[in-house]
């Protein structure tokens, strides 16, 4: 097996395929709204109010389906394209998310980012004095998952 084929091999090997499929499709990503930070002093609390953090403290993504594509540059990086529902402030939207994946030293490294618009979730970007927040919020992630042989 070539090193750049390792992720596809794990995903399609009969021994692991169902487990990997179940892992991805049962994965629920929850982000604590109060972990988001602004570079503008005093803006964080306005942002939390806008996202209704007291009643809905998490942004939640639940995948419904996915595909895996090999990277064109053949460097062992794959793309996992997930489609699913994201929920912000109790409003849901179906989105597509692209995550880069690579196996390195027995660890699956997942990283990516997704731009979301507050107005798509019925939210008005907050203002503080004469500064208005951008409608776009960029969510970035880096996840490290250990592969445990035999499980």
Image (cartoon, helix red, strand yellow):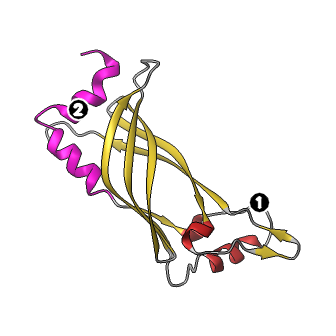
Give me the C-alpha separation between circle 2 and circle 1.
41 Å
Q: Circle 1 sits in a helix, a strand or a loop, which is it?
A: loop
Q: Which residue is mark 2?
A: 10
**Label for residue 39?**
1
Quadrant (top left, top right, bottom left, bottom right) of the C terminus: top left
Find residue 58 and report its horizontal and vertical position in percent: 48, 71
Residue under the point 19% across and 33% down: 12
Q: Is residue 4 magenta?
A: yes
- Mark 1 neighbour class, 10 Å CA radius: few under 14, some 14 to 19, many 20 or more: few
Residue in front for this viewpoint, 59 or 44: 59
In the rendered structure, the answer to whether residue 129 lies left or right of residue 102 reads right
- Mark 2 neighbour class, 10 Å CA radius: few under 14, some 14 to 19, many 20 or more: some
Q: Circle 2 sits in a helix, a strand or a loop, which is it?
A: helix
Nearest to N terminus: mark 2 or mark 1: 2
**Label for residue 107?**
none
| Numbered label tally | 2
In this picture, is 55 found above or below 127? below
Report which quarter residue 4 is drawn in: top left
Check whether the beta carbons of the residues at disc 2 and disc 1 lie within 8 A of each other: no
Q: Is residue 51 magenta?
A: no
Find residue 70 and report its horizontal and vertical position in percent: 37, 26
Residue under the point 67% across and 75% down: 124
Q: Residue furthest top?
A: 2
User: Which residues lie in the magenta part?
Assistant: 1-27
In the rendered structure, the answer to whether residue 76 lies left or right of residue 12 reads right
């Amino acid at each position: 097996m070539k090193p750049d084929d390792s992720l596809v091999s794990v995903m399609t090997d009969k021994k692991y395929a169902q487990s990997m499929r179940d892992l991805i499709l049962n994965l629920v990503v929850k982000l604590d709204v109060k972990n988001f930070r602004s570079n503008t002093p005093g803006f964080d609390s306005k942002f939390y109010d806008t996202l209704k953090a007291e009643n809905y403290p998490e942004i939640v993504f639940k995948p419904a389906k996915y595909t895996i594509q090999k990277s064109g540059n053949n460097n062992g990086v794959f793309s996992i394209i997930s489609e699913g529902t994201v929920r912000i402030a109790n409003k849901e939207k179906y989105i597509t998310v692209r995550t880069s994946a690579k196996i390195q030293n027995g660890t699956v490294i997942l990283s990516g980012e997704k731009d979301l618009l507050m107005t798509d979730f019925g939210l008005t970007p907050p203002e503080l004095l004469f500064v208005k927040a951008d409608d776009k919020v960029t969510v970035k992630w880096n996840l490290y998952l250990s592969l445990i042989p035999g499980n």
